[in-house]
């Protein structure tokens, strides 16, 4: 019996990447551009967004940026409508944007941190999914990758808003994978470990080396491109029977005991 050939190309697909102006979002937007996708880059930071879009256009990619505060619930649908108007549809959504506001649970401004973190990390992900869903359905194809964290699998002191939101992302991924599986839409999530991005830029090189050697099997921080390649694998057309998974891209952090 002959084997069916499954496509490993995302050429011509329309991909939305949130938080695309920095770190893993930027690396993912570039990689998808390299692979021939049309990329919609969303971010709250106009200067960085403009510079990443310029980089992509210079590299010959089809890309356009949209300035968006993902915690602004009213604004999300309008931006997705504009993306569809510009590119003609949506096939792939990478829910990547993130912030971290460490806060002891009994601190005065804890609930402010909670509201901000949950809005950007969790509520915005589901609102993006709701907005793109009709377009994935009409494409008869859909790939959603939600970026969670190893902080959704374990926890760090004072990180409870972040850990709660990231654990929520894992639950959201599983639930929507079950809900949308029969419509050729896959929903997966990635749990990055320690990655060199804007979010970890404030940690000293020395602390990074000590942490990575002690906690990961690979023994180093990763670069954002390494996560982008895992994300790309999950959105390939051929990747049609993988849904609801939680994929750590963490250098073995979650499996290392000693
Ligand atoms: P980063 O700071 O380099 O990039 C995050 C991007 O999100 C920035 O461009 C920022 O402007 C954007 N953003 C923040 N708030 C936004 C908002 N309200 N609306 C629109 N855009 C907004 O950090 P990163 O590490 O590349 O983060 C990407 C994802 O990876 C996040 O979800 C983060 O929680 C997750 N993560 C990071 C690490 C790590 O070690 N860096 C580990 C695990 C998970």
Image: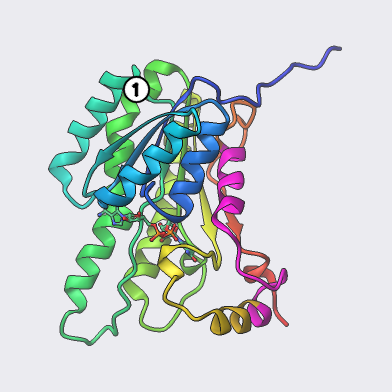
Q: Residue 63 falls in which quadrant of the image?
A: top left
Does residue 240 show up? yes
Q: Is residue 125 above or below residue 155?
A: above
Q: Secondary structure at mark 1?
A: helix
The answer to whether one can see residue 188 in this image is no
For the record, the magenta segment spans: 213-234
Percent x, y for residue 132? 32, 30
Image: 194 above or below 205: above
Q: Is residue 176 left or right of residue 36?
A: left
Residue 47 among magenta residues:
no
Q: Which image quadrant: the N terminus? A: top right
Q: Can you name the residue that lies furthest to the right here?
A: 1
> Where ligand 1 lies, by image quadrant?
bottom left
In which quadrant will I find the C terminus? Answer: bottom right
Q: Residue 24 appears at what percent x and percent y?
A: 48, 52
- Return the residue at label 1: 135
- Identify the image quadrant of residue 109: bottom left
Q: Is residue 217 within the magenta segment?
A: yes
Ligand 1 is within 8 Å of the C-beta of the residue at disc 1: no
Which residue shows up at 53% across the image and 52% down it? 190
Which of 135/41 is in front?
Answer: 41
Q: Is residue 86 left or right of residue 34?
A: left
Classify 10 Å Cα crowding around label 1: few (below 14), some (14-19), many (20 and above).
many
Where is residue 250? Give x, y as percent. Answer: 61, 63
Q: Residue at x 29, y 21 (%)?
A: 86
| Main SS of residues in magenta | helix
Name the one closer to the observer, 232 or 188: 232
């Amino acid at each position: 019996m002959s084997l069916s050939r499954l496509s490993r190309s995302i050429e011509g697909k329309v991909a939305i990447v949130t938080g695309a102006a920095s770190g893993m979002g930027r690396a993912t937007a570039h990689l998808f551009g390299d692979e021939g996708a049309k990329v919609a880059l969303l971010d709250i930071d106009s200067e960085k967004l403009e510079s990443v879009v310029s980089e992509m256009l210079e590299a010959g990619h089809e890309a356009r940026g949209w300035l968006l505060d993902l915690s602004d619930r009213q604004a999300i649908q309008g931006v997705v409508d504009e993306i569809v108007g510009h590119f003609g549809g949506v096939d792939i959504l990478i829910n990547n944007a993130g912030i971290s506001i460490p806060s002891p649970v009994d601190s005065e401004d804890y609930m402010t941190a909670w509201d901000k973190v949950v809005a950007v990390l969790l509520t915005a992900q589901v609102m993006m999914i709701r907005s793109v869903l009709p377009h994935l359905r009409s494409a008869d194809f859909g790939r959603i990758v939600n970026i969670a964290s190893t902080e959704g699998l374990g926890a760090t002191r004072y990180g409870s808003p972040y850990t709660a939101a990231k654990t929520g992302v894992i639950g959201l991924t599983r639930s929507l994978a079950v809900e949308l599986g029969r419509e050729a839409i896959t929903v997966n999530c990635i749990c990055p470990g320690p990655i060199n991005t804007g979010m970890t830029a404030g940690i000293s090189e020395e602390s990074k080396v000590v942490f990575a050697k002690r906690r990961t099997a690979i023994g180093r921080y990763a670069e954002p491109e390494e996560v982008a390649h895992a994300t790309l694998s999950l959105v390939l057309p051929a990747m049609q029977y993988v849904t609801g998974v939680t994929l750590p891209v963490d250098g073995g952090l979650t499996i290392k005991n000693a």
